Amino acid sequence: MMTTLKGIPAAPGVAMGRALFFDSEEPAIPKRPITEAQVPSEMLRLEEALIKTRHQIVGIQKKVATELGQEHAEILNAHLLVLEDQSLREEIIQGLRTEKLNVETIFNDVIHRHLKAFSRTEDEYLRERMADIEDVRRRVLRNLMGRQHATLAQLDHAAIVIARDLSPSETAQMPKQYVLGFVTDVGGRTSHTAIMAKSLEIPAVVGLQVATKRIRDGVFVIIDGGHGDVLVDPDEATIERYKLEQRRYQEASRQLLQLKDLPAETLDHHQVILAANIELPDEVPSVIAHGAQGIGLFRTEFLYLNRPDFPTEEEQFAAYSTVAEQLKPHPVIIRTMDLGGDKLASQLQLPMEMNPFMGWRAVRFSLARPDIFRVQLRAILRASVHGNLKMMYPMISGVEDLRRANEIFQEVRQELQREGVPFAEVFEVGAMIEVPSAALTCDLLAQEVDFFSIGTNDLIQYTLAVDRVNEKIAYLYEPTHPSILRLVKQIIDVGHAAGIWVGMCGEMAGEPPLSLLLLGMGLDEFSTSPVQLPIVKQVIRSVEYSFARQAVEQAMKLRTGKEVEAYLIASLKQAAPALVE
Ligand code: PEP
Ligand code: MG
């Protein structure tokens, strides 16, 4: 019988096909009863798996030592210590004898007990070891069961992927020809997984909470990514209805693309820049196809994901200069790496953090690891002669970290100068405004940068204290909250008063009713996922600038996010009825 599940709309479009369960991390552990006589042979299987795991880790250690140095390789000693732990073995033997269950189950239970105890301890060192133990647990289980790490890149037939969670790096590896769409239990609208789905133009619904429980492997499903609906085992009439809806969506997108070469200007000729966000250089054709006037955010951290080592200066130079060449004369804003949060680079082996989005990420990480940061800055500067490049730092929290980043940037410039390596003399450097402390001190920051780019995905999560990837509180994530309206308006006004331009690269810039508001606030540049650009352009081309300004004035008087949202939708409906459903 058909059931309809409601989740969070992540990437628009309708997709239908057979469900395929995907879990890259968690090997499915078989539970088998054993007899007392089988305890030694089960223990022997475990010893073999531990030895195999040891060989694998020592192999990785050698590679890390040659590529990154001995010091980095030693981080993996903690993994080896777990494998050698005698008391762990004793606990497992004890478990095998009392529970009389196979060694995979007992090993897994014992490790989970330890992880639980560690998570409660005050001892930071022990908490940091949780990630090591978790890693060892997965490796040993895979070796016990002979299973390799599954990746979506191995998919060889068309399916709708159902997963508890998908990391942004897994999503980036999706073969577009086979992944018709995907559904996850966790995640929010501005999680990088959702953003990646939009970039790949794969319809997706996230934060469904019960998808992996309620959808059986192999069942036929329809997903409507724009509305967040998932229909499980639909009847014929529903399938036909959604096929129609799929064609309607494709036709509407095709129609909007006809605006591609027209300027983003209001009826009374107020112009703004419409740029696109990308994660990887191969998204450039989509950027051009959707008529962007440049790239407002290149999330360069994606170059660091899904690989055992760091991208070299040459690799980064090739990526940045190719993108710059393809887009010129339009600008390309390279954001220095924003690792951390939900974008974890496996080669770093970072300890698990309690609050990763508020932790060691973005420019904080870059300033702590100038060795890695400098490589990127050299590559960016070298690429600057190949097009119209600009650069910005993520997660600036005040003047101090901005100055420190700029100091390193100046040192790298001087270094290149000494080496006689060419780079652009005029080069704009901006700050992302995505931390409330930066928003509230933007008058100070404006004196030291060439532009601002408002990162609302983070600014909203920090201002409203709503984790952007937590589906349980997603209803609180409100771009229209009066606090956000005030902050955004203040950043734009202060930037303009200081004589710099102000853009926005958060997803807020790509939502039609909100683009009316941002237009009226005087935002200079809107940068969003390429697929959202045509509809934003349509909004801008449908209204007078004065109408948008009046809408801002009214919206700023309202008291709740819901009131603001309803007001903006009504205003947009008045100006452009066809754009509102
Ligand atoms: C933002 O925070 O709004 C932003 C654009 O950066 P990211 O989504 O990569 O954190
Ligand atoms: Mg951000």
Image (spheres, rainbow, N blue to C red):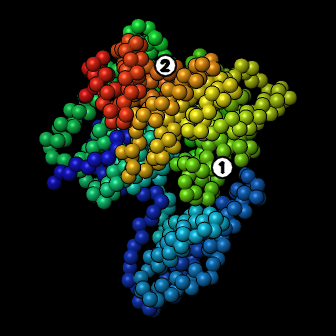
Above or below, 165 relative to 566: below
Q: Quadrant of residue 64?
A: bottom right
**Looking at the figure, which quarter contains the C terminus?**
top left
**Residue 535 on image: x %, y %:** 37, 23
The answer to whether any part of residue 139 appears in the image is no
Query: Image point 14% across, 43% down: which residue?
Result: 236
Above or below, 560 relative to 164: above
Left or right for 101, reference 277: left
Residue topped by disc 2: 522
**Looking at the figure, which quarter contains the N terminus?**
bottom left
Left or right for 379, reference 304: right
**Nearer mark to the viewer, of 2 and 1:** 2
Residue topped by disc 1: 309
Q: Residues within 10 Å of mark 1 (few under 14, many from 20)?
A: some
Query: Image point 68% across, 25% down: which residue?
Result: 447
Above or below, 163 relative to 258: below
Q: Quadrant of residue 229?
A: top left
Q: Quadrant of residue 124?
A: bottom right
**Residue 562 on image: x %, y %:** 33, 36
Q: Amino acid at mark 1?
A: Asp
**Residue 175 on image: x %, y %:** 44, 43
| Whether the residue under disc 1 has CB within 8 Å of ligand 1 | no
Query: Image point 65% across, 30% down: which residue?
Result: 445
Query: What kind of element bears circle 1?
Result: loop
Q: Amino acid at mark 2?
A: Gly
The answer to whether any part of residue 36 appears in the image is yes
Which sits in the foreground, 370 or 514?
514
Query: Image point 63% across, 57% down: which residue?
Result: 349
Q: Of the two numbered discs 2 and 1 on the same chain, state the one appearing first in sequence.
A: 1
Query: What kind of element bears circle 2?
Result: loop
Above or below, 449 relative to 161: above
Q: Residue furthest right?
A: 418
